[in-house]
Image: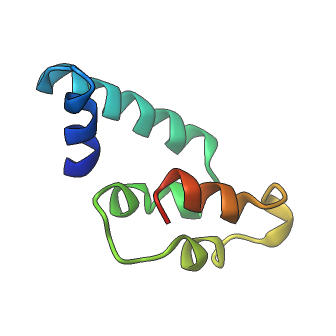
Amino acid sequence: MDELLQRLQGMGLDEAKAREVVQTVRSFLEEKLPDPIAAKLDDVLSGSPETMESLLGKVPSDALPKDLGGKLKGLFGG
């Protein structure tokens, strides 16, 4: 999450506002993502080595939109 905060600060946000943005986005993603992925969101944001493929493997395939793995890999820098 530190890397994300640094990037936001690099865009001109002060640290407090950057943390507020991260928390808002985190809360939004927790609401929208399937539970098994949302439960690992902090790990993903903190740079945990767990890959998106391993997270997606925990969700039934019929619960995911087509090519969600590819889209999420790009979103999280994978």
**Residue 26 position within the rendered picture, expressed as x and y whole percent measured from the top left:** 41, 39
Colour scheme shown: rainbow
Disc tally is: 0
Please state if 16 lies on the left or on the right of 62 as rendered: left
* Quarter of the rendering containing residue 60: bottom right
Is residue 74 left or right of 22 when viewed as pictured? right
Q: Is residue 35 visible?
A: no
Q: Nearer the viewer, residue 53 or 31?
A: 53
Q: Is the residue 5 above or below the residue 2 in the image?
A: above
Left or right of 69: which side holds 27?
left
Residue 24 image offset from top left, x and y in percent:
39, 28
What is the x, y in percent for residue 16? Answer: 14, 22
Query: Relative to 16, is 23 on the left or the right?
Result: right
Q: Tell me what residue is drawn at x 57 percent, y 62 percent.
A: 73
Indicate whether 60 appears above or below 6.
Answer: below
Q: Residue at x 21, y 20 (%)?
A: 13
Q: Is residue 50 visible?
A: yes
Horizontal and vertical percent position of residue 50:
42, 77
Residue in view at x 51 percent, y 33 percent: 28
> In the image shown, does 25 or 62 lie closer to the viewer?
25
Identify the image quadrant of residue 18.
Answer: top left
